[in-house]
Image: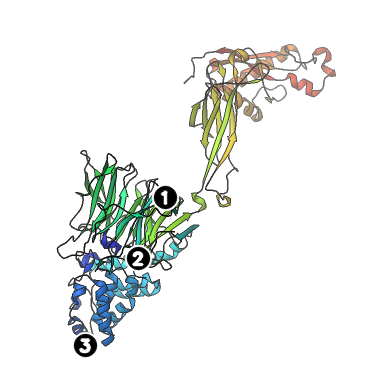
Amino acid sequence: MKTVLRFSILTGLMVLWSCQSSNKNFLGIDTPSDNRSTSSSGGFAQPATPDQATDDKKAKAIKLKKSFENGEYESAIEELKEDLEDDPDSPATNYYLAESYRRSNRIYEASPYYAKAIAGGFSDDEMELHYAKSLKANENYDDARKVLTDYLEYATVEKFVDRAKNELSNLDQLETIQLDVRKITVTPAVGINTPNAEYSPYYFDGHLYFSSTREAGDLFKGNGTPFSDLYKVKTSGLLTESGTLESLEDFINDEGVNEGTIAFSPDGKTMVFAKGNDGKKGGRQDVDLFISEKRNGNWTQPTIMPINSPDWDSSPVFNQAGTVLYFSSNRPGGEGGHDIYRASKNDRGRWANVQNLGPDINTPENEMFPYVSPDNKLYFASDGHAGFGMLDLFQAINEGGNITIKNMGPSVNTAFDDFGLVYSDFPYEGFFSSNRPGGQGDDDIYTFIDDTPSLKEVAYILKGTTYSLDQDSARSLLGGVRVDLLDAEGRLVDDVTTGRGGVFEFTIDPEKEYNLLGKKVDFLSGRNSLSTVGETIDKTTMAERSRTKEFTVDLDLTGIKVAEGEDFVVKNVLYDLAKWDIRPDAAKELDKLVQFLKDNPGVSIELSSHTDSRDTKENNQVLSQKRAESAVAYMVTRGISRSRMKPQGYGEEKLINGCDDANVDNCTEEQHQANRRTEFKIIKYDSSVGQN
């Protein structure tokens, strides 16, 4: 598939497999530099045989085609192919034909010509690197690995050795990357693509903006295709609306000049796009970023931005706040080919402070087409990180300052160029561009729908109502209650104060234990619990992208006036016969009373102990007092102040049934057990204590 030189015509994007050893003409396309070795000291340690030396001299003697020198690679390809008809094994002709394909972003067509150039003894410092890239673009990964491994046996130029090692490392990662299959559906965008190039989509305000060479007219000599312009089309989801596709205004699209890769600030008041490469001698010889502001509903005349360099600056995108502009550039001082940079607004509102994103993002190859998603993650295209061939789409993940680069996997990426990702409905739907087979002819725009289960959202919601209880335990709505959501360790997770209707709501997490505490002045605090353990929804079974699972837990609060003086039984506080030690089972029950006192710090209680009638009154009185004091002493060890608790033994004074001395032998064990009880009652309440 013939691919337009999108990388040069407006984004500085052409995939220059090695900017370090080549110059560029006004197209932003490589022009030949004199980097070809004439001896083994030029980068190879491998000695040449006499026959190879003769062939090498013969190869150097070829006269460069003027079309190649001028960067007119489409013409150069035709002329060099004609030359090969007379001398199909010419090392130099094969080399320059391979280079013409590479420099016009068709490296996947260069493999057989690099192979013949190498076999014929042509010498170039980077040729094997380019050859390996070409093989990789054709998914001939084992052959690419062998070329690089052999190359390392004789290459001596450090920067090329490092690049070869890096590419071998990338190839070694492919097996792992290929396993990262996600549930993503990729489809050619409807109503946009033509046999020419459509690429670099940008979604904003219900419209899809993109670059295209669809209009017939003068041809761009770098690749023999029409000049590119910017277009927009109205969309409904991923579908375009018929009859709405149009080119942008003339003050943006100039005839005979390439424009492309547009971006808008989040507030829609600033537009930045790339313009350059008119293909004329003495005309515009670079690609620059232009800016326009919307004033009184109209866009101002675009002006060149001060952050541009004498080289190629393109593919702009704003961060979500509109305060930072990311873009791609091949300016000197970067990590390699095209790097991603950032610029920010200064105090005067001007764009300045250009910074390279550094080696975590940028490689000695090419990084371009940055995009910042709504969750502020950086997406970009690269042929320098571990990928399948040419440009792949990547995500930069920043965790505590540590940046990890993640290939988006085989569900999106191919061995061809995949680039220019943008979301229209994050994180589920969006657009990107690719020159993969099966399109309409060149770069095409594709849609994607990501149904990966991990992206699906389940909202776990806790709802409830606060009530007051009267003496008959009848409920009535109670507002003005502070409700604390606590974790299993009692730490505050969230809090809310209910309105008149007493309704509260929290967002909670799956597989967690929670407690709820309701507090209001002149009311005893209400407590309840909730567990979401075992309640997690399996996202792999979800057809929808989001779902809500609700839990209901209410809180009952008792007014102090209702509770004061009332006796509350603490159940199951049992003692061994004639003993007052706190048994483990009794401790668990007393812990509930401890929690009650902690929840109600303004409350003081009388803790009373009662016996049955099966001993003398004197002995029962002593025993009950010791049991009450033992219970109080236990609660002191659990953090309750002794001053808030009055231990009181009542012996058999307050029997709750007729099992007195006269009827002691006529009562069942269950009746006697009912008399052996522990109770508490509120004897004091200070509303000023513990209220927030």
**Helix, strand, or loop for circle 2?**
loop
Query: Given this view, does label 2 or label 3 mark the residue nearer the observer?
Result: 2
Going by the numbered disc 1, the residue's amino acid type is Ser
For marks 1 and 3 on the same chain, the one whose residue lies earlier in the sequence: 3
**Which of the labelled discs sits on residue 424, or is there none?**
1
**Helix, strand, or loop for circle 1?**
strand
Q: Residues within 10 Å of mark 2 (few under 14, many from 20)?
A: many
Question: How far across and down, in percent of the image, does residue 448 sit?
Answer: 45, 56
Between 47 and 462, the one lying in front of the other is 462
Residue at the spot x=25%, y=46% of the render?
292
Question: How far across and down, in percent of the image, does residue 275 sit?
Answer: 24, 56
* Residue ID for mark 2: 196
Between 394 and 271, the one lying in front of the other is 271
Question: How far across and down, in percent of the image, does residue 264 sit?
Answer: 32, 47
The residue lying furthest to the right in this view is 666
* Scheme of image coloration: rainbow
Query: Given this view, does label 1 or label 3 mark the residue nearer the observer?
Result: 1
- Image height of 105 relative to 582, above or below: below
- Image height of 603 relative to 127, above or below: above
Question: How many angstroms separate mark 2 from mark 1 (CA)?
Answer: 24 Å
* Residue ID for mark 3: 50
For marks 2 and 1 on the same chain, the one whose residue lies earlier in the sequence: 2
Query: Given this view, does label 2 or label 1 mark the residue nearer the observer?
Result: 2
Question: How many angstroms separate mark 1 from mark 3 (CA)?
Answer: 62 Å
The N terminus: image quadrant: bottom left
Between 612 and 339, the one lying in front of the other is 339
Q: Toward which corner of the image does residue 599 lie, by quadrant?
A: top right
Q: Residues within 10 Å of mark 1 (few under 14, many from 20)?
A: many
Going by the numbered disc 2, the residue's amino acid type is Asn
